[in-house]
Amino acid sequence: MITAIAAVVIIGVVLWLMSGSGVPPAPQQQTAAAEPAAQQAVVSTEATPEQFSQAPASTPYSVPSTPRATPQPTTEAEPSPVPRQTAANSSGSSTLEWARIPGGSFQMGCTSGDSECASAEKPQHQVSVSGFWMNKTEVTVGAFQRFATANGRSMPSDQAGSNHPVVNVDWNDAEAFCSWAGGRLPSEAEWEYAARGGREGSKYPWGNSISHEEANYGEDQCCAGLASGRDQWVNTSPVGSFSANGFGLYDMAGNVWEWVGDAWHEGYSGAPSDGSPWTSGGDQSRRVLRGGSWFNDPRLLRVSGRSRVDTGYRFDNFGFRCARDASP
């Protein structure tokens, strides 16, 4: 009996070896594509441009992964109230549309009485800003195309019409364009001062309430694009489709998030009071974005709202505009 059993076992082993299996394969490791840490565009508990989850107002916003935006049709019937941005000459001197921002002082950070502020927007503090110039609109696809052509660069993917804001640009792309155009990225203080447009004590550039009549943003509950009222676009809208603020600037709330020059800091303790970019200390691998986008809920369009992302990240709701000190 034992001899018979042994023979069966031996025959089984021989047949298994002849099958070519060798040794049983080890189970494959599941390498689920982990979300890059940078896609948590703020501190793991702060606000970032991609997709923000609804977090308590007392803490910064957390960020889940963001879906890619669907490219929009490149044909728009609607005219933009703002002239299309024209080309820069071969030396990089810009002929973009610029607005003069007068110097002044303001209270930067969480607007008094705003219950939606995150800790990263505090403490509120006074900043004095020297006069400067800023693009009237976000940099368009058409303007960036001319820059890319002049410098032998590839265009970022998923662009809409030529008069929509360019998207899928990282911080280095934005900085390179502004330098070529004879300018620079604005500091975070300059950006907020300009966004407020001379108004003190308002959550948004136009007041304390918001609707799709004033800006291009997403659903009231995070996160998806929404066309409603004057906001006819699920994704980006042509620049200048809504009214300008007190300084003649368009889309300082919504449409696309805008890169600024500052490194990320968790709050404003120790921040410069002269309007200069805060580039020392903090998280040097990440830069600040401002303004909210077509994908975000109204909370993120507030003038004090802020976000951060790694400098090399690109998303379908990231754009920028430039600033400069000298007259263009």
Image (cartoon, rainbow, N blue to C red):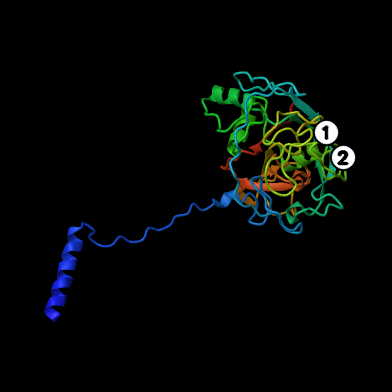
Q: Position of residue 241 (x, y in %)?
A: 76, 29
> Is 293 placed above or below 244 here?
below
Q: Residue at x 84, y 49 (%)?
A: 111
Q: Residues within 10 Å of mark 2 (few under 14, many from 20)?
A: some
Q: Amino acid at mark 1?
A: Asn
> Is 157 placed above or below 116 here?
above
Q: Which mark is residue 134?
A: none
Is 159 left or right of 213, judged from the image as shown? left
* Residue at which label 2 appears: 199
Is 284 left or right of 96, judged from the image as shown? left
Q: Amino acid at mark 2?
A: Arg
Q: Residue at x 61, y 27 (%)?
A: 144
For residue 96, which quarter of the picture? top right
Is 15 left or right of 24, judged from the image as shown? left
Q: Residues within 10 Å of mark 1 (few under 14, many from 20)?
A: many
The number of discs equals 2
* Residue at which label 1 appears: 245
For residue 145, which quarter of the picture? top right
Q: Quadrant of the N terminus?
A: bottom left
Query: Could you give the CA–CA distance between mark 1 and mark 2, rounded to whole angstroms?
Result: 9 Å
Q: Position of residue 244 (x, y in %)?
A: 81, 31
Which element carries disc 2, helix, strand or loop?
A: loop
Q: Which comes before the other along the chain, label 1 or label 2?
A: 2
For residue 67, which quarter of the picture? top right
Q: Position of residue 47 (x, y in %)?
A: 69, 50
Q: Position of residue 173 (x, y in %)?
A: 59, 34
Q: Quadrant of the C terminus?
A: top right
Q: Residue farthest to the bottom? A: 1
